[in-house]
Image: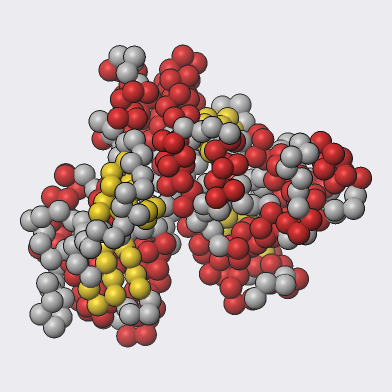
Amino acid sequence: MSAVFDSALAELNERHRDEVLAAFAALEHGREPVPEAQLLALRDATVRRDLQRLLYRLGRTLVRVGSTHWTSGFRDDVVARLAAEGATAQSRIDRAVLVLVLVHSVAIPRSQGLVSGDSWTSAHPTSVDELTRYTQLPRGEIRPALQRLRAAGLVQIAPPRGRSAVTDGPAYLPGPALHRLTKAARERLEHELILAAAPDSPLAAAIRARRPAAAPAPVAAAADPATSTTERNEDT
Amino acid sequence: MSIDDTALWWARHRAAGPERVPPASAHPTGMIRLVEPDASAVWLLPELPDNARPDVLDELGLPGIAVDQPNDTARVLAACLRCCWNEPTGPVWPAVPAPFDHVIGVFRAITGSRDERALHAAAMGAVRRLAGAGWVLFDEDTRVVRLGPRVASWSAAELSTLRELWRSLPAPPAGGA
């Protein structure tokens, strides 16, 4: 067995080790968050701690989704390093398109009080028509970007809803990979969007004031949602 | 900030796929090092224990990542395997480069009658998807395909199934492989 796994699970008996590995596979390779009732290593707090220790060694961490489901995401300290290195599979265009979907599907509905909580998943579809109509991105690049984002689980096609689906063409929702954002990552994404969309607002000023002085948000990055908001967001 | 090297390498792989590094640069714990045929670089690939691999999802009845056009994508991967894996009795990495036209030839032979333009579009879409995920390496300018580093993650059991598949596939045109 791989040395990392061996040392992380050395103290476990065989049964618990199998449970931890199965849960590891379910969280890391699965498309959706996993109900904790399904796996002992999610249900049992002691075994879950062993699972967390294994994930931690590999730069990952447990993320709770709602009150009954779990998934895995990047450790916050690791995210900071990866973002600084630029280690990401998504191009600038892909990140920009993702931000547009997040703005339409989550940020706007949330500001209208239609979405509560701090999740970046949503049931409010963003139509491709809406994406292409107002965007400053090259139109021909939006569809290929959506395909790549879909392959990464960062967006998904919205289920058709009655007549509107026919008239508006295909529509997208944030994908299941967004569940993998830790609480800190969800908050960072929200702050970056506020800084990008309303840099002169009192809210933006408050966000800037709360940030450590050592790492001020550069003005250029804040003005460009494509690079500033999703760099820490990729997960698959 | 001090983060364990192992955690960083594994996270980099998670974020950006298999990483190609200079040969002497990194030896992260628990990762396989795949040397390029000319030894100019090394690919890093995580080594998962048998019961932590993606096929566990099937046993648990959980959905994996959805692939667009899964059938055509799988067929093109099979065609790449048929063209590049010149010694199927041996290891699957690094195998040999093959012209994309040979891959299309095998793909055509296993997909049956289809409009030639649709066939090319389907093969191109699939090879790009596969290249994006590291299953193949595709040079769009020279139109040459190689197997990607991720194929080295196949287990012995999976490889023996693939060997049978390899034998059942038509040979590439122009006497290749």
Q: Nearer the viewer, residue B55 or A11?
A: A11
In what quadrant of the picture does the N terminus of chain B appear? top right
Q: Nearer the viewer, residue B125 or A37?
A: B125
Residue A31 percent across, percent down from the top left: 47, 44
Instruction: Say left or right for B97 vs A47.
Output: left
Q: Residue furthest bottom?
A: B116
Vertical order, A131 against B134 (above or below) = below
Based on the displayed image, in which of its 4 quarters is residue B149 positioned?
A: bottom left
Instruction: Say left or right for A50 vs A123.
Output: left
Based on the displayed image, in which of its 4 quarters is residue A94 positioned?
A: bottom right
* Count of numbered marks: 0
Residue located 67% across and 35% down the image: A184
Residue located 38% across and 76% down the image: B140
Residue B111 percent across, percent down from the top left: 25, 73
Residue B24 percent across, percent down from the top left: 32, 49
Residue A20 percent across, percent down from the top left: 38, 25
Residue located 42% across and 47% down the image: B13
Residue B143 appears in the picture as rendered? yes
Instruction: Say left or right for B81 vs B55.
Output: left
Instruction: Say left or right for A168 vs B51.
Output: right
Q: Residue furthest left?
A: B89
Vertical order, B74 against B144 (above or below) = above
Residue B73 appears in the picture as rendered? no
Residue located 16% across and 44% down the image: B157
| Colour logic | secondary structure
Vertical order, B7 against B161 (above or below) = above
In what quadrant of the picture does the C terminus of chain B appear? bottom left
Q: Residue furthest front?
A: B24
